[in-house]
DNA sequence: ATTGGCACTTGTTTTATCTAAGTGCTAATT
DNA sequence: AATTAGCACTTAGATAAAACAAGTGCCAAT
């Protein structure tokens, strides 16, 4: 891949991103100071290498997945955020009243708004939350609510109906034992320690300790499983993209976008320790062969999560990557200010 | 409107509901034991009266909004639920493990599934919830969580950052005063009594009582405003209806269905004390001129809300009305069993 | 290595033609 | 007075042919 070929591929990808129409040789020759025939020759080479494709024998060229991949890894200039994009995001972070998690959501709404892609914020209670307190509130003789609160201020509650053979005071007593023994325990270890440390204790003191134990076990379990909140913005924005002028395609995508669990899954899947922006093109997205998902992990106090943008494969990679990057930097600087 | 005319209109509406195609005179004459010309004459009358319309000069007839209205008020047989529909709903209520509010959600999912309409469950904390307890949990010196719990077991929480000039103990003290004075107060009156009864008391005992007051005021306010949860099932099911083979129409509707706040609004709007099933056809829906919304209020312990079905104007009124009716009856009988 | 030229493909748009479904009206019939 | 058969007429939709636009590959010349 010599320089001209790189430039040509870059130009093809970016033109296609902008216009959504297959790119022909004539449109490019003026920018490369050569004839359309020369471009055609080079294009034939790029096609042979698998970076671009034709829709039919006499059509212009469209980037292949391999072409997009090569583009995002070697050709695009990611750090280039435009002034107006920056301004819009800046405005959100400028408002110091706003909680960071709300700022993120607002940012992603903005991104969806100005780009016509769909954006996702998937927040998860971080595993570095520790148990602060569990409260039992009696609603009636047979109903109670268990409230679990962590040191980061995350609260979840669950209602129970208890069998009449159990005295509610025993449950309250158990909650006190738990509060004494397990405060400070990382929230995802609570279940285990409940079994290993607490169960033997209450066995001696509590009648029907199995049932009582199960109530708490299930409350904590719920906390750990129920710990994600998801915001999807601009689901229908995506339909404005020209690829969705086809009604079958549109319905297919609408269906997938309607499935929150599925979006949650693809937004969190395969997230390891990686901290960079990840780009999943087409099939790699595990969501739909015709979309690209760009994703970034974030970390704020008590919450870790991902932000993601879902767009057509022909999405504006440079713009999205640079905006996510910018958000990340802003988060960092705000965290420093707050001293966490 | 003599009987034959009624029957004819009924037949036209029901055929159109089934086929989505304009109804012609030939298709009907066999069922009415007369010639197509006779039907045509009657149709001309029905059109003159405004119950049916033509798409173009030589097309078959389609019910007008007035026609649908007349149909649902005078012609359809609402009590007729089909065996298989009943069975599917019955199955849900048969499971006595299921909380009533979850049963409702499941029912509406089923309805959406089997009819290809969109369904909505809008639950609201009922105004007959009363304050049971407010708890303050300190996260750090400057952060706290206020937890509000009602006698029906509904719990909401809100986090605050407090100015360093305020001692957290004063807040806890205030919460104790509130618990003493306001337990049992209907939740939507708490704000008022906080102002009238509690404020004068804490004025004497609490330093900077204004700020402290505001914390509680805002927590209760949040509870009252934040008190709805909405489930929308089968948003994209609706797109399977033939009216949405048109891409512009489809996008327009998709946009509206994406706006949860808007759906919430139309689901609760104009709800007075009425307890019957309400049908809003076309513009009456306040949602979209091309849909019908069928809606019913429900009441279960601690929660009042509405269930609604959104479909094309050409929706199967009889089927939906009878299913909502059935759900209502089942709710009643379950409530009796539980003795509320 | 680059270029101009040209035959060839394919998708898209336009136009014309044909068909199916259904209506309104008139005159005849019951 | 209500019903009916018959027929001219209208419109949407489907099918086919023609015209057009965009672009390619390849060859021979530069």
Image: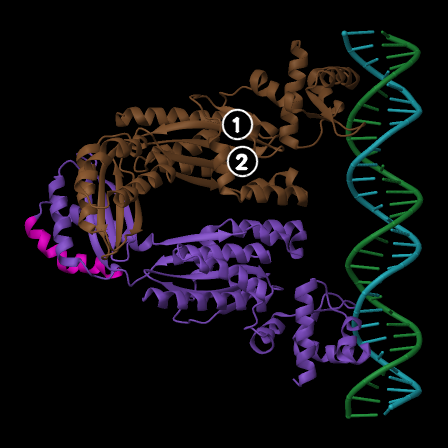
Chain colours: A brown, B purple, C cyan, D green
Residue A264 appears anywhere in the view: yes
Report the quarter where the N terminus of chain A lies: top right
Residue with the mark numbered 1: A319
Residue with the mark numbered 2: A115
Is residue B199 positioned above or below B166 on the image?
Answer: below
Front one among A97 and A302: A302
User: Residue at (63%, 19%) from the top-left corner?
Assistant: A10
Residue under mark 1: which chain is it in?
A: A
User: Residue at (50%, 38%) from the top-left corner?
Assistant: A263
User: Residue at (58%, 78%) from the top-left corner?
Assistant: B74
Q: x%, y% of residue C20? A: 85, 61
**Is residue B296 in the magenta section?**
no
> What is the number of callouts on the image?
2
Report the quarter where the C terminus of chain A lies: top left
Tell whether A235 sits left or right of A242: left
Residue B280 appears anywhere in the view: no
**Is residue B195 in the magenta section?**
yes
Secondary structure at badge 2 equals helix
Q: Which residues are magenta?
A: B188-205
Crowd band around label 2 with a 10 angstrom C-alpha radius: few (<14), some (14–19), many (20+): some
Q: Are marks 2 and 1 on the same chain?
A: yes
Crowd band around label 1 with a 10 angstrom C-alpha radius: few (<14), some (14–19), many (20+): many
Secondary structure at badge 1 equals helix
Is residue D21 positioned above or below A44 on the image?
Answer: below
Front one among B53 and A152: A152
Q: Main secondary structure of the magenta part?
A: helix
Residue under mark 2: which chain is it in?
A: A
| Alpha carbon distance from label 2 to label 1 | 9 Å
Is residue D7 positioned above or below D1 on the image?
Answer: above
User: Do labels 2 and 1 touch, CB within 8 Å?
Assistant: yes
Tell whether A92 sits left or right of B144: right
Q: Earlier in the sequence, mark 2 or mark 1?
A: 2
């Amino acid at each position: 891949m010599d320089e001209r070929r790189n430039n040509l591929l870059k130009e093809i990808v970016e033109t296609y991103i902008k216009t959504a129409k297959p790119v022909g040789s004539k449109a490019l020759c003026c920018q490369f100071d050569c004839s359309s025939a020369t471009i055609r020759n080079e294009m034939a080479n790029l096609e042979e290498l698998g970076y671009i494709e034709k829709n039919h024998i006499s059509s212009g060229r469209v980037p292949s997945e391999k072409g997009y991949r090569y583009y995002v890894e070697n050709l695009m200039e990611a750090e280039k955020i435009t002034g107006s994009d920056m301004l819009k995001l800046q405005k959100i972070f400028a408002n110091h009243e706003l909680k960071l998690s709300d700022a993120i959501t607002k940012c992603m709404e903005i991104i969806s708004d100005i780009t016509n892609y769909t954006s996702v914020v998937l927040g998860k209670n971080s595993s570095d939350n520790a148990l602060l307190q569990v409260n039992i509130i009696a609603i009636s003789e047979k109903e109670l609510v268990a409230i679990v609160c962590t040191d980061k201020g995350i609260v979840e509650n669950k209602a129970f109906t208890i069998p009449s053979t159990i005295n509610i005071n025993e449950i309250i007593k158990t909650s006190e034992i738990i509060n004494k023994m397990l405060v400070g325990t990382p929230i995802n270890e609570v279940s285990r320690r409940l079994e290993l440390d607490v169960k033997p204790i209450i066995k001696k003191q509590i009648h029907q300790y199995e049932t009582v134990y199960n109530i708490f076990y299930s409350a904590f379990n719920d906390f750990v499983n129920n710990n994600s909140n998801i915001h999807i913005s601009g689901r229908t924005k995506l339909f404005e993209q020209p690829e969705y002028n086809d009604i079958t395609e549109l319905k297919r995508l609408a269906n997938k976008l309607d499935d929150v669990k599925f979006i949650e899954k693809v937004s969190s899947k395969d997230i390891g320790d990686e901290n960079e922006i990840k780009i999943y093109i087409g099939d790699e997205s595990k969501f739909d062969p015709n979309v690209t998902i760009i994703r970034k992990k974030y970390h704020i106090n008590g919450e870790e999560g991902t932000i993601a943008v879902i767009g057509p494969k022909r999405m504006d990679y440079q713009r999205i990557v640079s905006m996510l990057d910018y958000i990340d930097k802003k988060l960092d600087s705000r965290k420093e200010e707050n001293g966490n």
